[in-house]
Amino acid sequence: MQVFQTLIIVGVIFVVIVITNAIRILREYERGVVFRLGRLIAVKGPGLILLWPFIDKMVKVSLRTVVMDVPPQDIITQDNVSLKVNAVVYFRVMQPQKAIVDVENYLFATSQLSQTTLRSVLGQSELDDLLSQREKINQKLQQIIDSHTEPWGIKVSTVEVKQIDLPQEMQRAMAKQAEAERERRSKVIAAEGEFQASQRLADAARILSDQPSALTLRYLQTLREIATENNSTTIFPVPIDLLKPFLNVDVKKKA
C-alpha cells in the first residue's frame, strides 16, 4: 500500500513538472523562438503556448524599442581635435528568429557596432561640422548601423549624438573666436548705420539747397522744440534771404 501511494505521489509530481514545462505564457510584446532537439521550428506568441517537455526549448525575445547608451568614446576629428563623445541608439527586434540564430548576443553586438561606427564617422568629420551639422551626422550614423544590423533582424530607428566634451583650451579658443565674431558684426552694423545716415544727410542737404524756404521752416521747428523745454534763452531764427545782401557785400569787398 505504501509503495502504491509513493508511486501516486511521484506520478503527480511528474505530471506537475511536465505541465509546468509545457505551458508558457508570453506577454504582448514578447515572442518565443522555439527549438526542438536543437532545430528551429517556429516563433510563437503572444499568449498561451504549449511545448513538448524536455524536447522543446524556448528563448524569449522582447519586441519593444531598446534605448542603448553608447559609452563615451575618445575621438580625434579630421582637424586633429581630441574629443569625448557619447550617443544613444534606439532599435527594436523585427525578426526574433534572426536575432537569436544569426548573432550570439544581439544586444552586445549592437552596442559594439555602435561604438566603432561612432568613432569611425566622427573621426572623418571636422569639429565645426560636428557642432553645426548634428542632424546630418545622426542620419549618417543611423544608416550605417542599420545596414549592419539588418541581417540580424534588428531595425535601428534613431541615433543621437548626446554629448560632446571639448578640452578646456579648445573651449577658451572657441570663446575668443565667438567674441571676435560678435565684435566684428557690431562694427559692421555701426559702419552700415553711419553710411546710411550720411546718405540721408546728403539727400536732406540737396533738398534744402533746392528750397531755401525749407531751411527757415526747419529753424521754426527747432525753435518750437527749444521752447518746450524750460530754458531761459530764446533763439529767433533769421531768414537766410535777409542775410544774402550782406553776404554779397562782404564777398565784393574781399574781391
Image (cartoon, grey):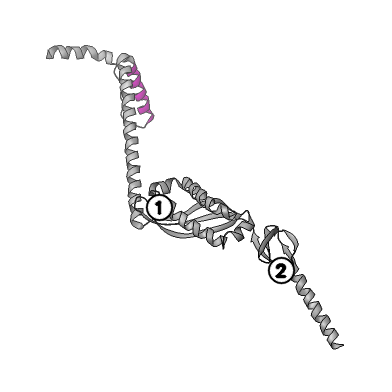
- Viewer-closest of 191 and 48: 48
Q: Secondary structure at mark 2?
A: loop
Indicate the amino acid at tag 1.
Gly
Q: Look at the image and give the residue range highlighted in magenta.
A: 214-229
| Residue 114, x across and y down, in percent | 50, 56
Left or right of 236: which side holds 118?
Answer: right
- Viewer-closest of 45 and 70: 45
Q: Quadrant of residue 84?
A: bottom left
Cβ atoms under marks 1 and 2 closer than 8 Å? no
- Which circle's residue, 1 or 2, is located before the other in the chain? 2
| Residue 69, x across and y down, in percent | 52, 59
Left or right of 6: which side holds 226?
Answer: left
How far apart, in angstroms, are the residues tagged by discs 1 and 2? Answer: 50 Å
Residue highlighted by disc 1: 123
Magenta run includes residue 219: yes
Whether residue 163 is visible: no
Indicate the amino acid at tag 2.
Ile
**Quadrant of the image containing the N terminus:** bottom right
Q: Quadrant of residue 195?
A: top left
- Is 82 rendered above or below residue 249? below
Magenta run includes residue 240: no
Q: Secondary structure at mark 1?
A: helix
- Viewer-closest of 17 and 62: 17
Residue highlighted by disc 2: 55
In percent of the image, x 46 and y 48: which residue is there? 137
In percent of the image, x 52 and y 55: which residue is there? 88
Q: Which mark is residue 103?
A: none
